[in-house]
Image: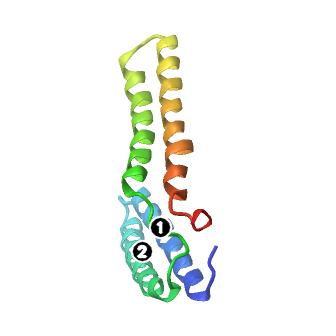
Amino acid sequence: MAATKSQGQSLTLFLAGLTAVCAGIAYSDTGVGVVALIVGAVMLIASFVAFLKIKPLEGRTAQGPQPTVLKLVGVGTALLGWLVVLFGLHVTASVGGRMFTSILGIAISLVGVCYLLPVASTKGAIWKS
């Protein structure tokens, strides 16, 4: 998952911090949970700082700039499908209506995830130059 030792250490610190934050949130009503939350948050901040230190050492990326608007449209379409499912379950009480809105929402999400986002990420790919 990591190419260098510093990337591996930063990733390990990030995962440990994320685990501690989740445990701290789950047990936030106890003293140990609050300590875990604070320690996890400090670990997350330290891992983010370590990631930022590593970034200049990586050099130039192989891919060119990707279209931001198309990526946002893809993410928006995926979220729209999720919202169709969410609101469709509250709008109708019949099983058939809920199935229809769920299938429609899944289809909308799949268009965003399987069509729009891959197009956005391969728009500036190096093999297309």
Residue 111 image point, x, y percent: 52, 37
Q: Residues within 10 Å of mark 2 (few under 14, many from 20)?
A: many
Q: How far apart are marks 1 and 2 (CA)?
A: 7 Å
Do labels 1 and 2 touch, CB within 8 Å?
Answer: yes
Residue pictured at 42% horizontal, 72% vertical: 40
Quarter in which the C terminus is drawn? bottom right
Badge 1 or badge 2: first in the primary sequence: 1
Residue 105 image point, x, y percent: 47, 29
Q: In this view, does 106 lie above or below 93?
A: below
Near-viewer residue (104 or 19):
104
| Image label count | 2
Of the numbered discs in the image, which one, if any, rests on residue 44?
Answer: 2
Residue pictured at 49% horizontal, 89% vertical: 57
What's the residue type where badge 2 is placed?
Answer: Leu
Near-viewer residue (31 or 76):
76
Residue 58 image point, x, y percent: 52, 84
Residue pictured at 40% horizontal, 65% vertical: 33
Instruction: Say what secondary structure mark 2 lies in.
Output: helix
Near-viewer residue (81 or 59):
59
Residue pictured at 48% horizontal, 53% vertical: 120
Q: Is residue 18 above or below residue 26?
A: below
Q: In this view, does 104 lie above or below 23?
A: above
The residue beneath circle 1 is 18
Quarter in which the N terminus is drawn? bottom right
Residue 122 image point, x, y percent: 55, 57
What's the residue type where badge 1 is placed?
Answer: Leu
Q: On the image, which quarter does residue 127 sit in?
A: bottom right
